[in-house]
Amino acid sequence: MAIARLILEEVFAISPLDIYMGKDIQLSENDREKLENIIARLHKYEPIQYVLGYSYFCGRRFRVSPNVLIPRPETEELVGTILRRHSVPPHRVLDIGTGSGCIPITLATHWPDSHIESWDISEDALALARQNNADMQTHVVFKRNDILSLGQNHDDLKQSFDLIVSNPPYVKQCEQLEMEHHVLDWEPALALFVPDDDPLLFYRTMVNHAADGLLAPGGWIYFEINREYGHEVAGLLENSGFLHTEVLQDLSGNDRIVCGQLPDINT
Ligand code: GLN
């Protein structure tokens, strides 16, 4: 019923009050076709956010399409944690694997003077993220980079950031069995899955680049993670010399965020 109400209100501007008051509602031929089309899409398990073309993240409306994940509440918690812990905005921020751009754009609305950069392998995702950036009047710099295949000497790896954040693919192929149709059939596999035999692939790559200079001394890294791997991801950070590593739980009590700090040069 929530979905029905959402569609009536958002697509046809028919408010719950109109319905409760028994207002006589006549859909035009055009609107009737539109409604039938929406119902047919929902029958195929297409997520309502893709049907509407947008979703909300940290109170802001972001465009979404099947080329990007629908932003999750866990990721709002990731962004909330970062904002709470960094009351002084970092100068340079990097987000890896951006999708709709919800993470860097939200950070940019709070930190308008920071340089915020964001990478993704998918041109389609980047096109959408750039639209969200324009809608929100933020100034995130989006670049096409595949973190897994960036050569050691790539110019973008010679930069250095004060904070790195990422919500990379972390669902194992074998977890597909437990997933719902509206995720499995519609959301981009590229953004979701990692091989069963190397579930930490993205984390290992990012931690190595971070420790090799992509993260400045004293800089912080924040990851969203598969709840099964909190301690392993924290271990990767510790083995690369990170301090103050923590595994934080989401509102459902699952391990969901791992963070750590590179030692400062002076300490
Ligand atoms: N949390 C998402 C899910 O469970 C996955 C996000 C991701 O792979 N980064 O579908």
Image (cartoon, rainbow, N blue to C red):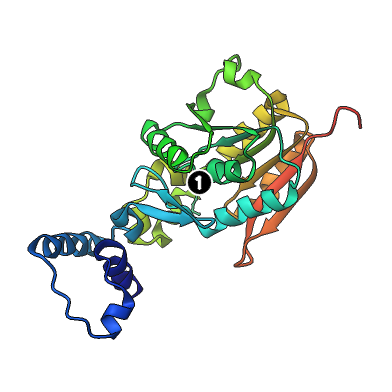
Task: Give the position of the N terminus as an image quadrant.
Answer: bottom left
Residue named by callout 1: 102
Tell me which corner region of the image, top left, top right, bottom left or bottom right, holds residue 20.
bottom left
| Image quadrant where one finds the C terminus | top right
Query: In the visual, does 183 lie left or right of 58?
Result: left
Q: Residue furthest right?
A: 267
152 vs 15, nearest the viewer: 15
Residue 4 higher or lower than 113, as above or below: below
Image position of 23 (left or right of 222): left
Percent across and percent down for residue 28 are 11, 65
Task: Say left or right for 120 vs 32.
Answer: right
Going 76% across and 37% down the picture, which residue do you hit?
Answer: 239
Res. 199 visible in picture: no
Left or right: residue 5 compared with residue 145? left
Q: Is residue 185 above or below residue 197?
A: below
Q: Give neighbour class at mark 1: few <14, some 14-19, many 20+ (Cα, 10 Å).
A: many
Q: Nearer the viewer, residue 124 or 130?
A: 130
